[in-house]
């Protein structure tokens, strides 16, 4: 984990990657990218509910997207 005055960077581990693959398979109808699935896995594991993204898949998966 890298911390700065403005943000914290979280590096995914093997467990995050396994959860991401599970997200990809369970939600294949969304055509998620591996990158988005890893981000979602990391966010779910750490209780992060908001994301800065223009990708509507985050909304579908239950995240608050900024900007809306």
Image (tube, rainbow, N blue to C red):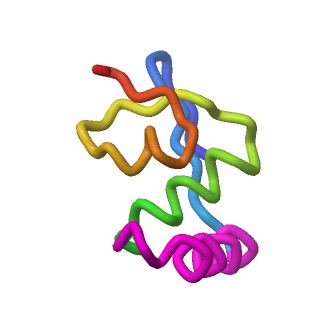
Q: Is 44 left or right of 9, judged from the image as shown?
A: right
13, above or below 25, in the image: above
Q: Is 21 left or right of 51, judged from the image as shown?
A: right
* Residue occupying image coordinates x 69% and y 47%: 44
Q: Locate residue 42, reporting x and y percent.
A: 63, 54
Q: Locate residue 21, reporting x and y percent.
A: 59, 80
In the image shown, does 2 or 25 lie closer to the viewer? 25
In the image shown, does 43 or 32 lie closer to the viewer? 32
> Going by the picture, which residue comes out furthest to the left?
54
Q: Locate residue 8, reporting x and y percent.
A: 55, 33
The majority secondary structure of the magenta stretch comes to: helix
Instruction: Look at the image and say whether residue 32 sits in the magenta stretch.
Output: no
* Residue occupying image coordinates x 44% and y 45%: 58
* Residue occupying image coordinates x 75% and y 73%: 15
Which quadrant of the rendered structure holds the C terminus? Answer: top left
Q: Is 1 left or right of 33, judged from the image as shown?
A: right
17, above or below 37, in the image: below
Give the quadrant of residue 29.
bottom left
In the image shown, does 13 or 27 lie closer to the viewer? 27
Give the quadrant of residue 11.
bottom right
Q: Is 56 left or right of 19, judged from the image as shown?
A: left
Q: Which span is picked out in magenta?
A: 14-31
Instruction: Look at the image and say whether residue 16 sits in the magenta stretch.
Output: yes
14, above or below 38, in the image: below
């Amino acid at each position: 984990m890298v911390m700065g005055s403005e943000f914290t960077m979280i590096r995914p581990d093997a467990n995050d990657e396994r959860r991401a693959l599970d997200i990809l398979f369970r939600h294949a109808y969304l055509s998620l990218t591996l990158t988005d699935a890893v981000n979602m896995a990391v966010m779910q594991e750490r209780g992060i509910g908001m994301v800065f993204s223009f990708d509507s898949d985050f909304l579908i998966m239950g995240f608050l997207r900024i900007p809306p």
